[in-house]
Image (tube, rainbow, N blue to C red):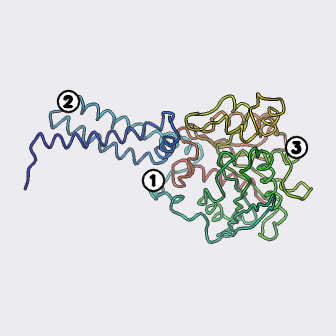
Amino acid sequence: MVRLKKSTLDRVIDILLLTVSLMAFSSAIWIVVPAPAGFIWLLAVAASEWSIWIAIFAFHGIVLGLFRLIFRRAGKATAVALGMAATAFVISLYPLAGTLSVARVNNVELSLSRYFAGVTNLTASRRNEQSATHRFLSIDDRELMLDVYRPTEITDNNGASVIVVHGGSWSSGGRGDFAQWNRRLAEMGFTVFDIDYRTTPQPNYLTATGDVKCSMGWVQRNAAEFNISPERIAIMGRSAGAHLALLAAYSNDDDRLPSSCPESDRNGKVRAVVSMYAPVELLWAYDNPANESVINGKQTLANFLGGSPHDSADIRQRFLLASPTSHINPATPPTLIIHGGQDQLVRLENLTFLGQRLSEFNVLHQTLIFPYAQHGYDYNFNGWGSQVTEKVMLEFLVKSTKAE
């Protein structure tokens, strides 16, 4: 047997300690510190959603550091490395601690086995065996499609449907981005319609909103084909898609935001809206952007609406027209508003603005805030935030779309 000299063993331990501590700290820190670049923001999303793995990694660093301090002669470098590992360990528990309080309020029991089950959204196919693709609009030499996920179980939710609107800063993304959630809704008995809308050319605030409205009317007019009730339709979206879902649902009777469908009648009224991290006060969002190191929020809004609101009164009016809060009234459908406390793309104040405005008109609504969740947290279908979101969202949709 080859025995390492004491100095050699110490160097090996020091290298392992420094490597483990530095990796854990450089990952965990982005859970609480704003990202300085877009690729770091992606790391922040991963760090927040898979933070327990960082905690496990950091714990090994703590063990190595304590061993070095207690049983071997150690210097300042060991103490610094141990401090980094301990700091990373504590920070990596923040997302779980923050979600536990939200889970208790909403009577959700978090599942550790589900958390470690893997990232189904990364490994699963974009569509399931129950899905089929249909064209709902041909316009400007383009075809807009939707994927239909039919119920996989017989439940009281059969006959109810959910329209899903993807995100992507109004300029990218596509249906099927969160297919695992569509499958889950189908398992609960809902029929899901995951839709396209025009992301180009910009400005597309009218065309994108009109396309979403068109899909709402199409689903209602074709309800019999899919064995659903035209009176039991809900709509949900994420990010820019959540904005469009809110705007289309809230402005159903506003002729300034017409449907893209050739039909002149106003179809597509929905029973409920689920909004996940949506911008809702666009004029405020332009003047108060989120993390500009991650996303150029002003330019994104200017592209969507055709310029700066400070360039002309006409463009300023567009910002107001395209803000869902401008269309709230006593007849606005019940709304579930969800946001992450560490969202670096859409500021948390948007949830507050929307909730306050809905309260002014006594519109039924519910808010859900995850203190350490990032924008797009629900891409990890098995994460802590997603576990709570799933139960709360399903209860909301079941109640809102119940047969009258």
| Left or right of 306 on screen, residue 344 | left
Residue displayed at 77% across by 60% down: 142
Residue 324, by quadrant, is top right
Residue displayed at 51% across by 37% down: 37
- Observer able to see residue 351: no
Q: Residues within 10 Å of mark 1 (few under 14, many from 20)?
A: few
Residue displayed at 53% across by 41% down: 38
Residue 265, by quadrant, is bottom right
- Observer able to see residue 346: yes
Q: Position of residue 107 (x, y in %)?
A: 58, 48
Residue 22, by quadrant, is top left
Residues under labels 1 and 2: Cα distance? 38 Å
Q: Nearer the viewer, residue 268 or 204?
A: 204
Circles 1 and 2, Cβ within 8 Å, touching? The answer is: no
Question: Circle 1 is placed at which residue position?
Answer: 112
Question: Circle 2 is placed at which residue position?
Answer: 75
Q: Nearer the viewer, mark 2 or mark 3?
A: 3
Q: Which of marks 1 and 2 is in front?
A: 2
Question: Circle 3 is placed at which residue position?
Answer: 256
Q: Where is residue 399 in the image (x, y as percent from the top left)?
A: 72, 54
Where disc 3 sits, the SS reads loop
Residues under labels 3 and 1: Cα distance? 49 Å
Q: Which amino acid, mark 2?
A: Gly
Residue displayed at 63% across by 38% down: 346
